[in-house]
Image: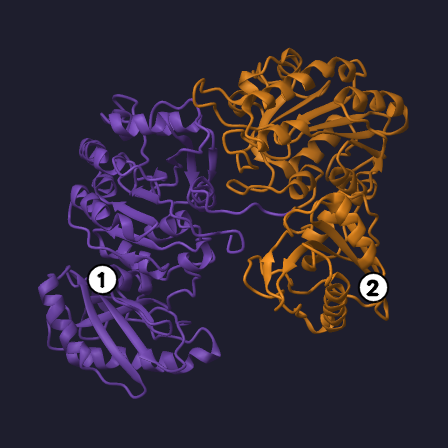
Chain colours: A purple, B orange
C-alpha cells in the first residue's frame, strides 16, 4: 500500500457506529437496524457498495481496540493492544514508546494479606483519585512512576525508564481467597522491571495499610504501545479523528491521526467535521451510544440511538465527501448485552463505487451486497481506490 | 497442485476478455456488459458456475501483467514483472533468465544537460528505429547491449552478461528541469551493472548530441524476468496461447505456453483455436478491444466490442471444450477511461460444474453466482477440477 498510495485532494469520511450489528428481537424477528426508522442510512445504501465485515475472523468477538485497528487497516492479531495500554489510552495519556503500562485495581485484603474483594467494593472515582495521589509519591530508583485514576476501583500504573520490559506476569490472581501473586519476569530482560513492579506492590501495601476498604492493589496486563506504522506513513493521508470517548481518541492518536474537538453529541461531532473539513483528507468519526445501549441490553434504546444518528446524517451528506464509509467495529446485540462475533453491515458510497441491489442498511440486506462477506482489512484499500488515491499495481 | 495434477485428454479453454468489467453509464445506470446484446454469453452463464473475481485483492487496480498472472494461478505480488521486462515482453523479445531489461525514453536536454522534454515530443517510431540503431553500436566491456525500438519515444535496453543485477535506481527523474540522474546500485552486487548502465548513458549522450529533438535517453524499471514455475510443470498441461498483442504473447511464453498464430480478429483467433485444437489441452485466448475501448472512454464502442465477441462465440462453443472459462483480467470502465479495481465477472461451464441461478453475464448478475466474490488465484484449481485433472487430496 505504501508504494502505490498517493496524495490527492479527495476526502474520505469513515463513520464507525460502535456495536451497530445486532440480532433479531424475539418478538419481531427484526434486528435493531431492521427495527429503526433510518431513511438516510437506507438512501445511502441504495447508492453504495454494501457488504458485511468480519473485523477479525468469523466467530471471533473483537474488543474495541482490535475492532477499530482492523478497520484502520492493521492486522489486529499482530498489533495487539495490551490491557495496560488500552487503559492508558482510555484516559487520554500520551504514552512514550518505551513506557510500560499496567491496569490496576484497588482491592481489599485481610490481616493475612488474602484478597477478600478484588474491586474494594467499587470505591468512588473521587476516593480513587485521592488514593492514586498517595501512590504517585512512591519512588523507586531508576524509574519514574505515575499512578493515574480511571474510574471507580480502576487505575493505570505507568513505569518510565531505561531498559524496561513489559514481559511480566500479573499480580492479580483474578479470584479471592489468595494473596496477590508475586510478579514474575517472563523473559530474562524483564528481571529488573519485575523487581520494580514487586517493589511498587510492596510500597503500595505500606501506604494503603490503614485505608479501608481499598487497602491494597492488583496489577495486570503489563504492556507497551505497539510499534505501529502510522496512517500518514502508509497511505500518505492527513487523518483526523472526532470521537467523544477518550479510548477512541487514544487509539486514533496511536495510528497517527490528529484528534479534533468533538462535543458530546453526534450533531456536535458533525459540526466539528464541518469546521475542520478543509484541513484534512481523512476523517474518522466515532459514534458510541449504539454500543452502550447494546451492552445495557436495551433493544429499544439501541434502536433510538440508530435513529438519532440517522437524523444527524444530512449535515454529513451535505459535505459530499468523495468517499463515505459507514460501518461498525463489531456487533453488540441487545439480546446478548455484550460485544459479539456477528459480522457488521458495511457501505461505501463514492462516485466510483459499483452499486449493488441493496436498498437498506441492515445485516440481512447487506449480505447481498457487492462485497458480500469480507474482512475489515480490505476496507482501507477500497477507501483509497474509490478516492482515486492508489496507483495501478504492476506493469 | 503439482502433486495432485494429472494428465487427461480433456480440454480447457480460458477466454480472457481484457478489461471487460465496467461501471454504470450515468444515463442508463447500466454497465457496458449490461448494455450489450450478448445472447451467447448469457446462454453460457445459464449453464455455468458464475462469480466475480478480484485479480489481486479488493481495491487494488491490476496492471495487465499481474492481472493475467493471477488468472494463470500465480501470486502477482510474488511474481512481479518489472517495467523493463514488461516492455520487452511487449515487443516479443525472448529474454534469457539473466538478462536485464530497462524501459527507455528518448528525451530532449538543453546545453547544460537539463531535461526539457521527457518524451522528445513523442518522436515517430521510424525515427526511434533509426536512433536505436545508433545506440545499438555502443560497446562496453563484459556486456552485450541491445537497444530495441518499441513505439514513438519508447525503447528497451537489454544487457546480457555475467553477474549482472537489476537492483538499480532509475536515471529518469520523472520530471523536467533536472538532469538525468546517476544510476545507483541498490545492493553491493549491482555495483558493476550500475557502472555499465551509467557508461551506456554517457555514450548515448555522445552519440545523440547532434540529434534533435531526441538528444538523450532516460532509463527506468531495470528488471529481470521472474523465475516462475511453468504451467506444464505445475499442472502437467500442454498449454497454448492465441493473442494478438505482443505483451500477452510474451506473458504466455513466460509461463510456458506455446504461442500459436492468431490473426487480428477474434474470428481469426477462433479459427486458429480450431486448427490447433487437437494438439494442446489448455488454450488461453486473449481478446483485447474491450480494454482498448474502455481506455478510450468510449462506452458505446466497448459495448460493440462485447457484441463482436459474443457474435464469434458459436465457433468456440461448437468445439465443446470440457471446461470453458470466460472472465477478464481487470475492469476498464469507460466512465473512468482506465484500468480499475472493480471485480470482474467470471463463468465456468463444464459438464461437472454445479450451475447457479445466474442468467446473464454481467457484474451484478454474477455477484449472485455460485462462487460469489473470490480471488483469481482460485481459477486454475477450479479449471483443473472441472476437467477431472486433479486427484483427491489426502487419504
Q: Which mark is residue B220?
A: none
> In which image quadrant can residue B334 be found?
top right
Q: Chain of mark 2?
A: B
Locate residue A73, reporting x and y percent: 44, 50
B207 relative to B293 in the view: left or right: right
Residue at 75% x, 23% y: name it: B323
Give above or below for B235 relative to B290: below
Task: Determine which residue is flagged by label 1.
Answer: A91
Closest to the observer, A32 or B227: B227
Estimate the spatial distance between the alpha carbons at disc 1 and disc 2, rounded to whole Å: 68 Å
Locate residue B26, reporting x and y percent: 43, 23
Image quadrant holding the C terminus of chain B, namely: top right
Locate residue B81, reporting x and y percent: 69, 50
Res. B98 visible in picture:
no
User: Label 2 near label 1: C-beta < 8 Å?
Assistant: no
* The residue positioned farthest toward the bottom in the image shown: A141
Amino acid at each position: 500500500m505504501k508504494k502505490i498510495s498517493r496524495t490527492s485532494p479527495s476526502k474520505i469520511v469513515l463513520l464507525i457506529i460502535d456495536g451497530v450489528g445486532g440480532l433479531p428481537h424475539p418478538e419481531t424477528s427484526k434486528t435493531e437496524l431492521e427495527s429503526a426508522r433510518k431513511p438516510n442510512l437506507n438512501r445511502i445504501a441504495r447508492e453504495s457498495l454494501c457488504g458485511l465485515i468480519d473485523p477479525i475472523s468469523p466467530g471471533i468477538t473483537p474488543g474495541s481496540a482490535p475492532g477499530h485497528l482492523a478497520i484502520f487497516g492493521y492486522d489486529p492479531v499482530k498489533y495487539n493492544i495490551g490491557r495496560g495500554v488500552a487503559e492508558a489510552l482510555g484516559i487520554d495519556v500520551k504514552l512514550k514508546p518505551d513506557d510500560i503500562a499496567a491496569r490496576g485495581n484497588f482491592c481489599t485484603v485481610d490481616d493475612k494479606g488474602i484478597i477478600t474483594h478484588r474491586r474494594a467494593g467499587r470505591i468512588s472515582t473521587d476516593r480513587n483519585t485521592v488514593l492514586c495521589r498517595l501512590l504517585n509519591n512512591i519512588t523507586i530508583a531508576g524509574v519514574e512512576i505515575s499512578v493515574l485514576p480511571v474510574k471507580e476501583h480502576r487505575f493505570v500504573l505507568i513505569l518510565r525508564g531505561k531498559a524496561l520490559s513489559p514481559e511480566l506476569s500479573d499480580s492479580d490472581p483474578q479470584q479471592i481467597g489468595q494473596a496477590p501473586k508475586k510478579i514474575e519476569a517472563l523473559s530474562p530482560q524483564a528481571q529488573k522491571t519485575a523487581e520494580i513492579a514487586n517493589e511498587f506492590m510492596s510500597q503500595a501495601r505500606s501506604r494503603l495499610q490503614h485505608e479501608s476498604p481499598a487497602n491494597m492493589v492488583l496489577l495486570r496486563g503489563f504492556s507497551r504501545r505497539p510499534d505501529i506504522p502510522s496512517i500518514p506513513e502508509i497511505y500518505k493521508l492527513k487523518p483526523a479523528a472526532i470521537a467523544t470517548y477518550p479510548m477512541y481518541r487514544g487509539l486514533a492518536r496511536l495510528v497517527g491521526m490528529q484528534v479534533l474537538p468533538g462535543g458530546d453529541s453526534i450533531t456536535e461531532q458533525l459540526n466539528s467535521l464541518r469546521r475542520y473539513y478543509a484541513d484534512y483528507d481523512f476523517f474518522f468519526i466515532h459514534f458510541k451510544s449504539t454500543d452502550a445501549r447494546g451492552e445495557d441490553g436495551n433493544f429499544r434504546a439501541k434502536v433510538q440511538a440508530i435513529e438519532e444518528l440517522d437524523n444527524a446524517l444530512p449535515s454529513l451528506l451535505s459535505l459530499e465527501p468523495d468517499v463515505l464509509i459507514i460501518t461498525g467495529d463489531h456487533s453488540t446485540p441487545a439480546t446478548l448485552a455484550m460485544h459479539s462475533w456477528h459480522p457488521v453491515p458495511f457501505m461505501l458510497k463514492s462516485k466510483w463505487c459499483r452499486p449493488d441491489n441493496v436498498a437498506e442498511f441492515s445485516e440481512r440486506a447487506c449480505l447481498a451486497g457487492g462485497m458480500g462477506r469480507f474482512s475489515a482489512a480490505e476496507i482501507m484499500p477500497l477507501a483509497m481506490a474509490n478516492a482515486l488515491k492508489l496507483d495501478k499495481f504492476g506493469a
